[in-house]
Image (cartoon, helix red, strand yellow):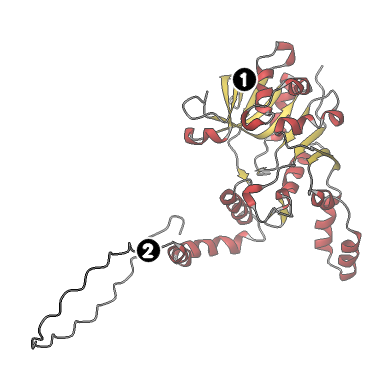
Amino acid sequence: MTSYVTKAVIPAAGLGTRFLPATKAMPKEMLPVVDKPAIQYVVEEAVGAGLNDVLLVTGRNKNALENHFDRNTELEDTLARKGDLDRLEKVNQSTSLADMHYVRQGDPKGLGHAVLRAKMHIGHEPFAVLLGDDIIDARDPLLSRMLEVQRQLNTTVVALLEVDPSQIHLYGAAAVVETDEDDVVRITGLVEKPDRESAPSNYAVIGRYVLRPEIFDILEKTEPGKGGEIQLTDALQGLATAPSWTGGVHGVVFSGRRYDTGDRLDYIKAIVQLAAARDDLGKDLVPWLREFTATDGVDAVEAAAPVAPAPAQPAKPAKPAKPTVATIPAEPAAEPVPRKRDLVPVAGA
């Protein structure tokens, strides 16, 4: 019998070392993407797919996550007295967004261990896992499609993205077999962050999962893998090769818009792309971006580029003085004519 998914788990215990020093005192999940923290986009995605029961797996120094989804009566009263109803509505939106729960991971033993910490809350029903580093554009629903496939096949479902083979070492990679559905494949094996030569395919596992509860039994028996951590990919490999009554593992191949906020450059790209798509910001931002990249942006990049110092020349021995000889003064050299700077056209200008 198929159980409907009602709960979502969001692991959020990472230290965010790639964003230091910004994340020294602030959780990386609270870094703003335009005007909302990254974690709110992920919770909104879960709620948009019908999952209103959300468990955050947190760690030390992550109290700001709980505070964000809790009431701030002083702020609410101040905004109400000022009549600032638009901002008050935004503040209240995060407070009433979902039925939020929290559990601490304790020791940072990997994604698999973080998911295992949700066992008591989940019980014996399928559930979704959403990673906070991945923001899926609301215009390209992924989780809803994964829940649909889970109901149809009573299986474990992971999100897959076709990446350039040179990038597969950054992800878990899946060996797949086609099905009758164009965007659904059956997964026969998984490898965590393989090198290019040993990767079973260029289908990368991205941060969305719909898991059957059998995953907990496998995680409890999973030994630490790559990086000395309990890897969810290793547990999914066990489920992919388990008896058929477990449902196996299937993948939904995603081709929509995804923003990676776990990398500094991609984080900046995410802000620009999401802001450009907004009605209140895009109409002013996009023309400015075109102008910036065509003129000021090029100059700024060139000015910021480090210039290698000229190699030091060895000191030459002093030459003996020559007798003074009368010479005819040379004509002064003509001043160089400044060369007109070539402008290189920039794509999108």
**Residue 348 x %, y %:** 46, 56
Find numbered disc 2 in the image and state the secondary structure of the residue it sits on.
loop
User: In front here: 106 or 268?
Assistant: 106
**Vertical comparison of 34 with 236: above or below:** below
Query: Would you say residue 111 is visible in this rendering?
Result: yes
Tell me the residue at 73%/43% (across/down): 42
Q: What element carries label 1?
A: strand
- Looking at the image, residue 180 lies above or below residue 232: above
Q: In which image quadrant can residue 98 be found? A: top right
For the point 66% across and 43% down, which residue is it? 133
Whether residue 49 is visible to the viewer of this picture, yes or no, is no
**Spot occupied by residue 127 in the image (x, y as percentages of width and height):** 78, 29
Disc 2 crowd rating (10 Å Cα; few below 14, some 14-19, many 20+) is: few
Disc 1 residue type?
A: Arg
Viewer-closest of 184 and 176? 176
**CA distance for labels 2 and 1:** 56 Å
**Relative to the observer, which residue lies in front, 10 or 292?**
10
Q: Are marks 2 and 1 in contact (CB under 8 Å)?
A: no
Observer-nearest of 126 and 147: 126
Amino acid on which the number 2 mark rests in the picture: Pro
The reply, left or right, for residue 123 in relation to residue 228 is: right
Local crowd size for mark 1, using a 10 Å CA cut-off: few (<14), some (14–19), many (≥20): some
Q: Tell which tag, 2 or 1, sits nearer the viewer.
A: 2
User: In percent of the image, x 48 and y 29: which residue is there?
Assistant: 196
**How many marks overall?**
2
53 to 283, vertically: above or below? above
Please give the residue where the numbered disc 1 appears in the rendered image. 186
- Between discs 2 and 1, the one toward the N terminus: 1
Q: In which quarter of the image is the N terminus?
A: top right
Q: Name the residue under label 2.
A: 309
Q: Where is residue 82 in the image (x, y as percent from the top left)?
A: 87, 70
Specify the quadrant of the image occupied by residue 80: bottom right
